[in-house]
Image (tube, grey):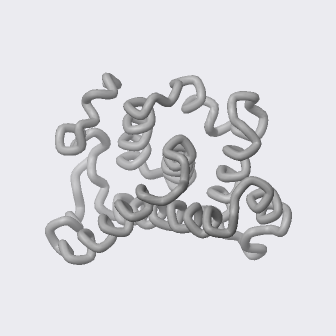
Amino acid sequence: MSTRVNHFKTVPALIKSLSGVTQASHATSVDRVIKDLIDIRASQLNGCAFCLDMHVKQAKINGERELRIYHLPIWRESPLFTAKEKAALALTEALTRISDHGVTQEVYLSTQEHFSDVEISELTFAISIINSWNRLQLISQMAPGSQDSAYGLERANLQ
């Protein structure tokens, strides 16, 4: 797989801005574990190999158990996720797979049961940001793992 367009070179100011929003999102109250789950699940749904590779490695570095990562495609049935994590994953899927119905009242009420309005806004930004990165990587087709050394991802010991 070769890179088609390198957004870091063609539109560095826009990448810098999106990177800044990403960093601001990391500084919110969204739990790191939930953020990792959001990044992995959205990347799975979007078929973004580069981002999925990156975020699985980041999650492992952050202490996530591999079995939970393996269970993400079946999170609804899996006993490995808390109700709060499942609410965040349901919102992730609703905002990533936008349907004619948008975010259903059921998904919203489940989210509201576990998160404050501020946290819901922060979750929405986190989900929107990973979806933006996924779309940028889907068009560029950067090879999974090609930036591991730049991001320190070799520490995950996943080859």
Instruction: Name the image quarter holding the C terminus.
Output: top left
| Residue 24, quarter of the rendered image | bottom left
Residue for point 36% across, 42% down: 54
Vertical position of residue 85 compared to residue 91: above or below: above
Q: Is residue 64 left or right of residue 81?
A: left
Q: Is residue 3 left or right of residue 157?
A: left
Taking the view exactly as shown, the residue that stands out farthest to the right is 106
Vertical position of residue 155 compared to residue 150: above or below: above
Residue 89, image x and y in percent? 66, 50
Residue 29, image x and y in percent? 53, 56
Q: Nearer the viewer, residue 100 or 40?
A: 40
Q: Nearer the viewer, residue 73 or 120?
A: 120
Taking the view exactly as shown, the residue that stands out farthest to the left is 9
Residue 37, image x and y in percent? 55, 44
Residue for point 57% across, 29% down: 70
Vertical position of residue 24 compared to residue 59: above or below: below
Residue for point 55% across, 32% down: 69
